[in-house]
Image (cartoon, rainbow, N blue to C red):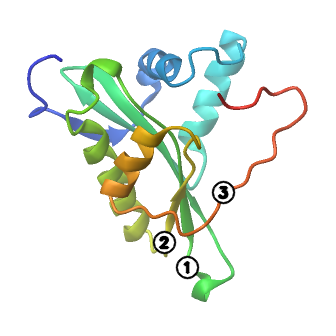
Amino acid sequence: MPASTDSLVIRSAKSEDFQGLCALYAQLISNDIAADDDFRLETFHQILTQQGVDLLVGELAGTLVATCMLIVVPNLTRGCAPFALVENVVTHADWRGSGIGKALLRVATDKAFSAGCFKVMLLSGSANKDAHRFYENLGFTTSKTGFELRAPGYPARN
């Protein structure tokens, strides 16, 4: 593992973060479905401008080392309190276990609660016990059961 995490900066992604994010996502899903570069860049810019979406990054010395996406969703129940989803959580393999992922998710949950969200939800692969312990250590519970339905043609999660 490289030196210190003292200079970690957690912030919203900017357009110049595209390549660094792509490198992190390659570690998240090594066999991801390919997308045309132009379409991928167009999607990235859509994410950056989508209301309610905050693509957070953890940066050390100019290098992206972690990311997650926070989505705040308006809601007509719970007194109209919104809820939040966290997706695509990844820390660079060289930095796992250093506290960066924990710091990143604390910022994400703080942002969600500051936005009035009554809960933050995320899904984790059912066999990924290390990730489950990580999320539980941050206060997430398995109080509900997650379900997903994949579109035809998309591979099942490994």
Give the farthest residue toward the bottom. Answer: 79
The structure residue drawn at horizontal position 37% and vertical position 56%, both measured from the top left corner, is: 136
Q: x, y (%) of residue 137?
A: 31, 55
Can you say whether 109 is above or below 89 in the image?
A: below
Mark 1: secondary structure: loop
Q: x, y (%) of residue 21?
A: 46, 23
Callout 2–callout 1 Cβ contact below 8 Å: yes
Callout 3–callout 2 Cβ contact below 8 Å: no
Cα separation between marks 2 and 1? 6 Å
Q: x, y (%) of residue 148?
A: 75, 49
The structure residue drawn at horizontal position 51% and vertical position 18%, both measured from the top left corner, is: 22
Q: Amino acid at mark 2?
A: Cys
Q: Which residue is tagged 2?
A: 117
Q: Which residue is tagged 3?
A: 146
Mark 3: secondary structure: loop
Crowding at mark 1 (Cα within 10 Å: few <14, some 14-19, many 20+): some
